[in-house]
Amino acid sequence: MTLVEPRDKCVREAAPVLKTGRKWAAKKAVGDAKAALRIGDIMGQVQHGRGGLGFSSAPPTWHKAAPAQRRKMVVNEVQKQEERMRCIKAISQAKQGEWMRWESVEQRKIGWQDLWSVEQSRISFLIRSTYDVLPSPQNLNLWVGEDPSCPLCSSPATLRHILTGCKVALSQGRFTWHHDQVLRCLALALEDKRNMTNKLPPVPSKHYTQNITRPGEQPPRKGVKTNPRPGQLEAARDWKMLADVGQRLIFPAEIATTNLRPGIVLWSGSARLVHLVELTVPWEDAVDEAYERKKLRYAQLATEAEQRGWRVRVYPMEVGCRGFVAHSTTRFLRDVGFSGQELRRTVKNLSEAERSSNWLWLRQKDSGWGPQAQ
Ligand SMILES: [Zn+2]
């Protein structure tokens, strides 16, 4: 487009013919993308996903765009079409296309920098586990007819069984170890946030009304940065936290009496606010199911604490065993005040759950599992 469409006649005539190969021709791809963009103009703004009407931002219109903008739009459109073809192919593949059914997890991006810095075996495990093409006994049985049974419990050993389902592995504490690795990572991030918040100057009065324009006041001018929505931690400076990592969590008696052990309890006496965080590390397909199960588990405890005058927020959250962080997790982090770079870093750290999965995978044939081996 840069060479074919400029106003200068000499440049236009000097444009080379691009020969890109048999399967893909630049000219055809650009033509298709332009046609799709023109059709987009005719259709106008359409709804995507489950957001409310008018929730998404309006895409730029083709007929109003400047040449440079048009080039960018065509590149985006070609990428979108390639992605669409990939999805069509994935739907037709029962096993490799399973990720199409994961609704509640965040997208994961592996950039060039990650590819360079992370060791090859980890990237290989991540990609092959995502598409479930690792040589698990079940897959080996399919490919070369080997014994498909689990070395620990002799039921059919799929990758899901090895990472989240094996009863013997569960009794040995492998999955608890895996869960604790992720919980520790989350607890460390929250502990930093808690310490930082507690050190801040005292809560200003009417803290939550600062973005509201009162009658007679001028609304903030466009372009002037207003404060973002404050996190829930901003409401107090006496946050306390307990995490069920390393030692057994005993639920704080001032809130309620129970023998339930949520992963993390974060509370403030002055704001009378409690956060109950329950982390699960499920198979990615089962994220929604885990969320509902955990939500029910803490309903009674929440009611009891509310009767004592606490406001209770129950946050079941999931980090998939292959490192895909669920929306519930990012929602919680945003609610307590993580944003921008800090949020991205925490999500990235949590998504390294696949590291522990890799370890579980490597140790699948060892019958023993003890503290010395970890
Ligand atoms: Zn097993």
Image: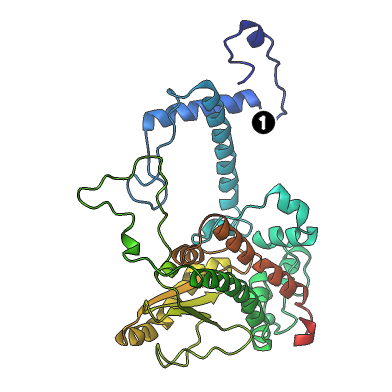
- Kindly state the secondary structure of the residue where label 1 is placed: loop
- Amino acid at the residue labelled 1: Trp
Of the 4 image quadrants, the one containing the C terminus is bottom right
Residue 144 is drawn in which quadrant? bottom right
The residue labelled by disc 1 is: 24
Looking at the image, residue 308 sits to the left or right of residue 275; the answer is left
Residue 275 seen by the camera: yes
Residue 206 is drawn in which quadrant? bottom left
Outermost residue toward the front in this view: 201
Write the residue at 34% across / 62% down: 208
Spot occupied by residue 142 in the image (x, y as percentages of width and height): 72, 65
Write the residue at 34% across / 50% down: 52
Spot occupied by residue 152 in the image (x, y as percentages of width and height): 73, 84
In the rendered view, tell whether residue 295 sits above or below residue 8: below
Q: Residues within 10 Å of mark 1 (few under 14, many from 20)?
A: few
Of the 4 image quadrants, the one containing the N terminus is top right
In the rendered view, tell whether residue 325 sits above or below residue 1: below
Looking at the image, residue 317 sits to the left or right of residue 314; the answer is right
- Given residues 54 and 81, the one toward you in this image is 54
Outermost residue toward the top in this view: 9
Spot occupied by residue 308 in the image (x, y as percentages of width and height): 32, 87
